[in-house]
Amino acid sequence: MWFLAWPWVLAALPLPLLLRYVLKPAKGMSEAGLRVPNTDSFSTLKDRSGAEQVFNWRFWVATFAWILLVVGAARPERMGEELELPVAGRNLMLAVDLSGSMDQKDFELVGRRVDRLTATKAVASDFVERREGDRIGLILFGERAYLQVPLTLDRETVNVLLMEAFIGLAGEKTAIGDAITLAVRRVHEQESDAGDQVLVLLTDGANTAGEVNPIKAAELAQQVGLRIYTIGIGAEKLEVSSLIGGRRQINPSADLDEATLTEIAELTGGRYFRATDTSSLQDIYKLVDELEPVEEAESGFRPVKSYFYYPLAAALLLVILACLLSLSQRLRMQKIVEGMPSAG
């Protein structure tokens, strides 16, 4: 699409005509500049002069040169096709506990009681869908930690493999320290321009397996700039049947090591959250969205190229051409005068 950056400059187009009518004409010469005894030798010059009166080339050259100068001053520009700008996101790892205790059915989803992992899948899946532009990785851990999905922009694959995970896949115990260490290693190895490195770790217990102490792993995360948000999942009260009849209340999250999870988060600049039901778990992931906002996609960019130099160059060529023609005409006239017979 063509347009003028400064279209108001076109108002200067009639300026020469206004000056012609406003300014007084120059006084003509009262005497001829050349005195000759007769004009027979100027017959050729008269013919040329007569032709010029029919077509005044100087006037038209000056007119076109002025139009080109004004158009050039108005800066003609052309807008190209819209280009999409890349969105620079962050490296975001999800670590999900698959230990045996995640089988505890103390959460509700769509009106029915479900285990902790099923509720985690539903909420975390929505969280992944919202993280457009981030490179997302998935770590599943139990007795051992496994990298299920390396950092990728393919959120659909992350969701599919998350939904296929099941309790006991990585063992019955909980290796929190190994999961953090694996995330540190993958983030450190990943060569990217992402400025933020984030780990969201969800567990319902304490570190009961693995080779690395969770606090030592958090210190490693701090060194590489990995910020960790920890989520302790599990209800605080649950009614179960009693052996002697009736029902009694228990704390299904008695094994949750909140102190360690809090220390891990604080060491790395993150936060610890407590999810006691599906609603609070959803709120936590939404809060993580606010703390680690998705990079907004920038509006389309249209490159603009300026072409003002074309009309300016054309105007310059016209002026040069006019000067050459005037010089040529003067040389011809000089030759005619020199070839005239001397008076006397």
Image (cartoon, rainbow, N blue to C red):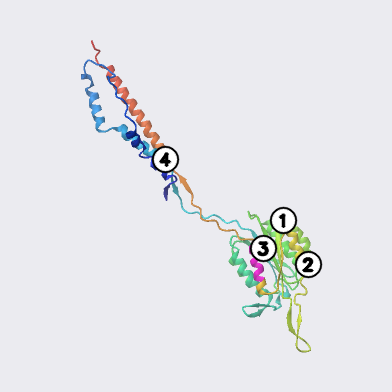
Disc 4, disc 3: CB below 8 Å?
no
Instruction: Measure the C-alpha gap from mark 1 to mark 3.
Output: 14 Å
In front of the other: label 2 or label 1? Answer: 2
Horizontal arrangement in the rendering, residue 36 relative to residue 265 (left or right): left
Disc 2, disc 3: CB below 8 Å?
no
Relative depth, front residue between 5 and 242: 5
> For numbered disc 4, what is the local secondary structure?
helix
Instruction: Measure the C-alpha gap from mark 2 to mark 3.
Output: 22 Å
> Which x, y percent locates residue 264?
75, 63
> For numbered disc 1, what is the local secondary structure?
helix
Instruction: Measure the C-alpha gap from mark 2 to mark 1.
Output: 23 Å
In front of the other: label 4 or label 3? Answer: 4
The disc, 1 or 3, on the residue closer to the chain's N-terminal end is 3
Q: Which residue is mark 1?
A: 224
Relative depth, front residue between 109 and 33: 33
Relative depth, front residue between 281 and 21: 21
Horizontal arrangement in the rendering, residue 310 relative to residue 47 (left or right): right
Question: Residue shown at 30%/20% (left/top)?
Answer: 334
Instruction: Measure the C-alpha gap from mark 2 to mark 4.
Output: 72 Å
Tell me where residue 31 sits by quadrant.
top left
Q: Which residue is mark 4?
A: 72
Question: Residue shown at 24%/30% (left/top)?
Answer: 51
Q: Which residue is mark 3?
A: 93
> Which x, y percent locates residue 76?
42, 44
- Number of the label disc, if any, that sits on residue 259: 2
**Magenta stretch containing residue 287, yes or no?**
yes
Residue interval drawn in magenta: 281-290
Q: Residues within 10 Å of mark 2 (few under 14, many from 20)?
A: few
